[in-house]
């Protein structure tokens, strides 16, 4: 959400959110020119609403059931309770005739709840993760309630056109509302209200990446990273929250086979995987971590020499300077998500490569794949195809790298987060003026 900060400062908005710690009640306060309105969650609500319904029901269901979603009625009750608390906080904070912009799958009921409390305000909702195909969505025991919750918004934004289409199909099939193109006629009182559902692909604030990439100390750090890895011919990089949607296991498997088959040599390549700790109290994440760490140590045990390591696995979070140094050091960036709303790491890598070098290997199951057409595209389930894509990236000539990277950079720089928020807010104003 860091990318939204500049916009929040410009519009003098209040930011309503959970402070990130259970059982803590804080009064509203100001930080860096933004008014923050903390919403408290009890330890039980963190377990049932956040780790439970949001991250163990909705997250796996919306990411094509890569992990099995858990359906528990108490989790749903907690989700309704907490959504209502957020809606009340937003309804109290917003000015007469103002705008409320709701973010993401943890708050899908908030648009309708805010509308009931404050019919005078304009409501936007942005969905950062995928919306699933109807056959999967239909599993959700509370599928109709969630659709009605979302349709409380004037504009419902998605990452990809496909997500908006799936949502509109669910609305038509489940609620039988009239849908014309991206517009939904939502019954309200005796009449109907029009809601717009379409894609607004999110992006990044490119400025800090470009600035850091030009800074002497960051460039020196990139060189130092290279040297400390033993100056390999190629550095491969993965940067992800440690999440089963990111395809980290598939990437490690493909790389391990390339080493085992001798198509890559441990003296020539190093794969750096930053896997930042995430949702460590959800079972599926505990298992994933074990699986990945087993796979990494097997490959390293089988292929390392005393001086060279096949995989540098870093289960840590880093400051942005270090991330940019890693992006600059990496010849090949591996983004192999099995399903991903957008994937900002792909865009950050591209923004950082002010030298027009480096190769992005990008899964077709990311939102970013719709825009970043000059990446080396992969289906991460196809391990042979993934191996070939890695080899293509490792062997790509500087001229080909430059040609592709220039086109990728143009796309990301022309469509940054400012362009994204402006287009969303413009759509919101337009729908409200109808
Ligand atoms: C969700 C959707 C959608 C990661 N490790 C470190 C670190 N990061 C930063 C990355 C990037 C962000 O976290 C991750 O964003 P992604 O887009 O890659 O993925 P999700 O976290 O799953 O985000 C996703 C996104 O929302 C936005 O709509 O694109 O599809 O799943 O910015 O750089 N940053 C630092 N240290 C780390 O160790 N500083």
Image (cartoon, rainbow, N blue to C red):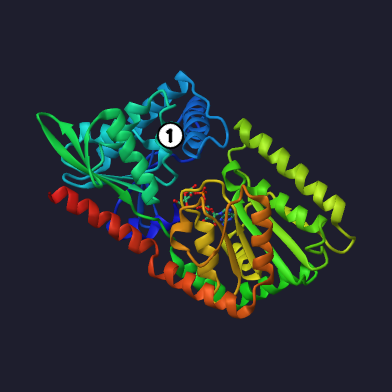
Instruction: Where is residue 104? Give x, y as percent.
Output: 40, 42
Instruction: Where is residue 92? Give x, y as percent.
Output: 25, 37
Instruction: Please give the residue where the numbered disc 1 appears in the rendered image.
Output: 25
Name the residue at 60% across, 68% down: 359
Q: Residue furthest top?
A: 73
Q: Identify the element where label 1 is drawn.
A: loop
Q: Residue furthest bottom?
A: 399
Dot 1 beta carbon under 8 Å from ligand 1: no
Q: Nearer the viewer, residue 370 or 227?
A: 370
Name the residue at 33% across, 57% down: 421
Q: Nearer the viewer, residue 48 or 365?
A: 365
Q: In screen coordinates, is 125 left or right of 283?
A: left
Q: In screen coordinates, is 161 left or right of 365?
A: left
Instruction: Where is residue 57? Give x, y as percent.
Output: 49, 30
Q: Do we see residue 215 in this rendering?
A: no
Q: From the viewer's perspective, is residue 256 above or below residue 142?
A: below
Q: From the viewer's perspective, is residue 433 above or below residue 93?
A: below
Q: Do we see residue 63 in this rendering?
A: yes
Q: Residue furthest left?
A: 190
Count of numbered marks: 1
Q: Nearer the viewer, residue 340 or 149?
A: 340
Name the residue at 26% across, 41% down: 153
């Amino acid at each position: 959400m860091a990318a939204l900060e500049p916009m929040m400062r410009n519009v003098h908005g209040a930011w309503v959110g959970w402070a990130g710690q259970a059982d803590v009640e804080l009064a509203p306060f100001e930080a860096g020119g933004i008014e923050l309105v903390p919403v408290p969650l009890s330890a039980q609500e963190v377990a049932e609403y956040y780790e439970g319904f949001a991250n163990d029901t909705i997250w796996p269901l919306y990411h094509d059931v890569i992990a099995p979603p858990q359906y528990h009625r108490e989790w749903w009750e907690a989700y309704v309770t907490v959504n209502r608390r957020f809606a009340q906080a937003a309804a109290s904070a917003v000015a007469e005739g103002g705008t409320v912009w709701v973010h993401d799958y943890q708050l899908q009921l908030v648009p309708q709840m805010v509308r009931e409390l404050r019919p005078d305000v304009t409501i936007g909702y942005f969905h950062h993760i995928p919306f699933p195909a109807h056959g999967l969505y239909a599993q959700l025991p509370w599928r109709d309630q969630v659709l009605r919750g979302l349709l409380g918004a004037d504009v419902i934004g998605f990452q990809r056109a496909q997500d908006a289409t799936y949502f509109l199909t669910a609305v038509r099939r489940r609620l039988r509302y009239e849908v014309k193109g991206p517009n939904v006629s939502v019954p309200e009182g005796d009449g109907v209200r029009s809601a717009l559902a379409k894609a607004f692909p999110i992006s990044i604030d490119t400025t800090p990446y470009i600035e850091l990439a030009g800074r002497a100390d960051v460039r020196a750090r990139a060189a130092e990273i290279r040297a400390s890895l033993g100056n390999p011919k190629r550095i491969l990089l993965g940067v992800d929250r440690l999440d089963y949607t990111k395809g980290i296991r598939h990437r490690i498997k493909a790389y391990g086979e390339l080493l085992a088959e001798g198509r890559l040599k441990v003296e020539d390549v190093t794969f750096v995987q930053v896997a930042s700790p995430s949702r460590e109290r959800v079972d599926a994440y505990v298992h994933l971590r074990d699986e990945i760490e087993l796979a990494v140590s097997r490959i390293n045990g089988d292929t390392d020499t005393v001086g060279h390591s096949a995989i540098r696995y870093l289960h840590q979070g880093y400051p942005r300077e270090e991330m940019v140094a890693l992006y600059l050091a990496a010849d090949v960036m591996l983004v192999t998500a099995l399903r991903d709303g957008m994937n900002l790491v792909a865009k950050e890598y591209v923004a950082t490569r002010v030298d027009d070098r480096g190769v992005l290997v990008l899964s077709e199951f990311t939102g970013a794949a719709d825009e970043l057409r000059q990446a080396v595209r992969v289906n991460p389930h196809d391990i042979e195809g993934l191996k070939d894509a890695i080899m293509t990236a490792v062997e790509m000539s500087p001229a080909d790298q430059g040609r592709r990277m220039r086109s990728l950079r143009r796309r990301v720089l022309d469509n940054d987060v400012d362009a994204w928020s402006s287009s969303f807010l413009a759509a919101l104003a337009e729908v409200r003026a109808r």
